Amino acid sequence: MANYFYKWAPLLVIGTLVLLGLPWLGLIALILVLGVLVSALATLALAIASALAAISRTLRHHVAPAFSPSTRRRSPHLVPTSGEGDA
């Protein structure tokens, strides 16, 4: 199977040189490559934004109830002490 790809490698190299050697075809190839790169960058940005949104939703769901005002009033750990039991 690997021999099959080795047989096509010179044709691919010569085809690339011919494509980039002709001015208009080279410009078209450059525009296509730039389109692929921009779409890949947009996909990466969307993936990062989606991950950050999911993380913020998770943190808001798990952290917010612990710091809500009603939880603070009921929590015995946040009640100020008079200091009588301190050494």
Image (cartoon, helix red, strand yellow):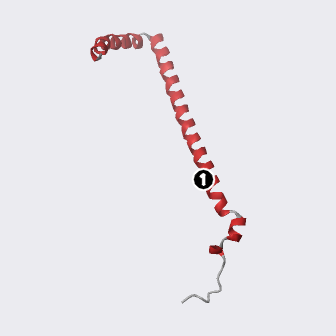
What percent of the width, then of the height, locates residue 34?
Answer: 50, 24
Q: Is residue 8 above or below residue 77?
A: above
The residue at 66%/63% (across/down) is 67
Task: Out of 86 and 24, give the one closest to the viewer.
Answer: 86
The residue at 30%/16% (across/down) is 1
Q: Could you say which quadrant of the image residue 63 lies in?
A: bottom right
Q: Could you say which quadrant of the image residue 46 lies in?
A: top right
What percent of the width, then of the height, locates residue 23?
Answer: 45, 11
Left or right: residue 23 compared with residue 57? left
What percent of the width, then of the height, locates residue 24?
Answer: 48, 11
* Residue bearing mark 1: 59
Crowd rating for badge 1 (residues with CA inside 10 Å; few <14, some 14–19, many 20+): few
What percent of the width, then of the height, locates residue 21?
Answer: 39, 12
Task: Out of 37 and 85, give the one closest to the viewer.
Answer: 85
**SS of the residue at dot 1?**
helix
Q: Is residue 28 above or below residue 49?
A: above
Q: In this view, does 79 lie above or below 29?
A: below
Left or right: residue 27 compared with residue 82? left
Q: Is residue 41 above or below residue 10?
A: below
Left or right: residue 84 compared with residue 19? right
Q: Which amino acid does label 1 sit on?
A: Leu
The residue at 61%/55% (across/down) is 62
Counting the numbered discs, the total is 1
Task: Out of 37 and 54, give the one closest to the viewer.
Answer: 54
Task: Out of 64 and 20, give the one closest to the viewer.
Answer: 64
User: Which quadrant holds the C terminus?
Assistant: bottom right
Left or right: residue 56 compared with residue 31? right
